Image (cartoon, helix red, strand yellow):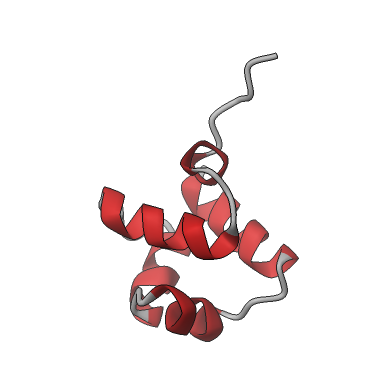
Amino acid sequence: MLSHNLKKIRQDKGLSQLKLSKLSGVAQSSISEIESGKSNPNISTLRKLASVLEISLDELLGKPKVV
């Protein structure tokens, strides 16, 4: 879920992996590994990515919204 969400949200915001990397301070190779499902990031990395993407951790992780 995370891998799909990160890639979709990044693309929806018009960001390349390289641009997201520069803005977040997370290595481009790490972003690539997360998006391909090869890596599970720590909470610090998730926070950096969510902050740059201007979304909550719940949105990034794909947790369903409670209505």
Q: Is residue 36 at least partly visible in the picture?
A: no
Compared to residue 11, the image places residue 1 above or below, namely above
Where does the image place residue 11, in percent across and percent down from the top left?
A: 69, 68
Residue at image coords 58%, 50% = 55
Q: Is residue 27 at least partly visible in the picture?
A: yes
Where does the image place residue 22, in percent across and percent down from the top left?
A: 45, 84
Where does the image place residue 6, in percent across and percent down from the top left?
A: 55, 57
Q: Is residue 47 left or right of residue 10?
A: left
Q: State how many labels appear.
A: 0
* Quadrant position of the C terminus in the picture: top right
Q: Residue furthest top?
A: 67
Q: Nearer the viewer, residue 37 or 47?
A: 47
Residue at image coords 57%, 52% = 4
Q: Quadrant of residue 64?
A: top right
Residue at image coords 52%, 65% = 52
Compared to residue 21, the image places residue 49 above or below, namely above
Where does the image place residue 66, in percent across and percent down from the top left?
A: 63, 16
Compared to residue 17, the image places residue 55 above or below, namely above
Q: Quadrant of residue 9?
A: bottom right
Residue at image coords 74%, 64% = 12
Q: Is residue 14 left or right of residue 33?
A: right
Q: Nearer the viewer, residue 1 or 15?
A: 15
